[in-house]
Image (cartoon, rainbow, N blue to C red):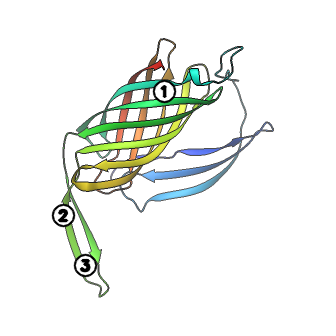
Amino acid sequence: MGNIFCMGPSVGMAFKNGIDLSLKYEDYTKDKATKTLGLRLAYGFSAVKMAVHKKAGCSVNNSDTEIGISINPGVDVNSSNNKILGGDIALYQPVTNNLMATFSAGFTHMNRQYLSTYGLMDGNGNIYYNNNLTVRNIVPVKAGLRAFLGDVFYLGGEAGVAFASNRNTSFVYTPSLGFKLRNGLDIGAKYDNYSHRLIQDALSLKLGYRFKL
């Protein structure tokens, strides 16, 4: 029985009385059948109260809009031998004092290709097998949100469309976490999940820099 990678992004609400109500999505590597969507009911005890990410005496305005550029080295989650190198440019627009809307476009290159074999069944029960190589070049275009849980630490999530070589397109979602430092550096990690069977999921570092417009 082989090892599998499991990703479980979630979204929800934590109430002051301790109740935690959220929706959780679980994805087990590249088997598109092993995905679950469930409701999570919990009760939490807070040991440390984190500071709200905001500027004293300053409200959200257009002057807080930022542009970021980054390089994203990583690996295919199914094979650490498949090295990945990407980059992106992003626009960050504050929504509240600790929440930002994000819009990004990038390019990802995968070092290796693999042969993907899958079967299709016609109306008569006959099975036909297709053999295709996985794609190497991807252009993702995404939008999402980034929530700050302190002065520098954030959790983020994006979703959008990935345009790949050989005219392949795919839905992509990207949960992430990281640190936005006061000197403009943006350091974190992200997981890119693609719905298309010919595009390999990726786990990458994010090494970026942000500046105000």
Which residue position is annotated with label 2?
A: 131
Which residue matches tag 3?
A: 127
Taking 68 as reference, is 156 above or below it? below
Q: Residue furthest bottom?
A: 124
Residue 202 quadrant = top left
Q: Secondary structure at mark 2?
A: strand
How far apart are the alpha carbons under marks 2 and 3?
A: 13 Å
- Label 1 close to label 2 by CB (< 8 Å): no
In contact (CB < 8 Å): disc 1 and disc 3: no
Crowd band around label 1 with a 10 angstrom C-alpha radius: few (<14), some (14–19), many (20+):
some
Q: Left or right: 156 with respect to 150?
A: left
Identify which residue, 213 or 44, lies in the foreground: 213
27 versus 204 height, above or below: below
What distance separates the C-alpha of mark 1 from that of mark 3?
46 Å
Question: What is the spatial separation of the Cα atoms under label 1 and label 2, in whole angstroms?
Answer: 38 Å
**Count of numbered tags:** 3
At label 2, the amino acid type is Asn
Residue type pointed to by label 1: Gly
Q: Amino acid at mark 3?
A: Ile
Task: Label 3: state its secondary structure.
Answer: strand
Name the residue carrying label 1. 178
- Give x and y (percent) for residue 67: 45, 25
For the point 47% across and 46% down, the residue is: 159
Dot label at residue 139: none
Could you tell which of marks 1 and 3 lies nearer the N-terminus?
3
Towards the viewer: 99 or 149? 99
Q: Is residue 23 visible?
A: yes
User: Which residue is drawn at the image coordinates 44% and 27% (left, top)?
Assistant: 188
- Residue at horizontal 71%, vertical 30%? 46
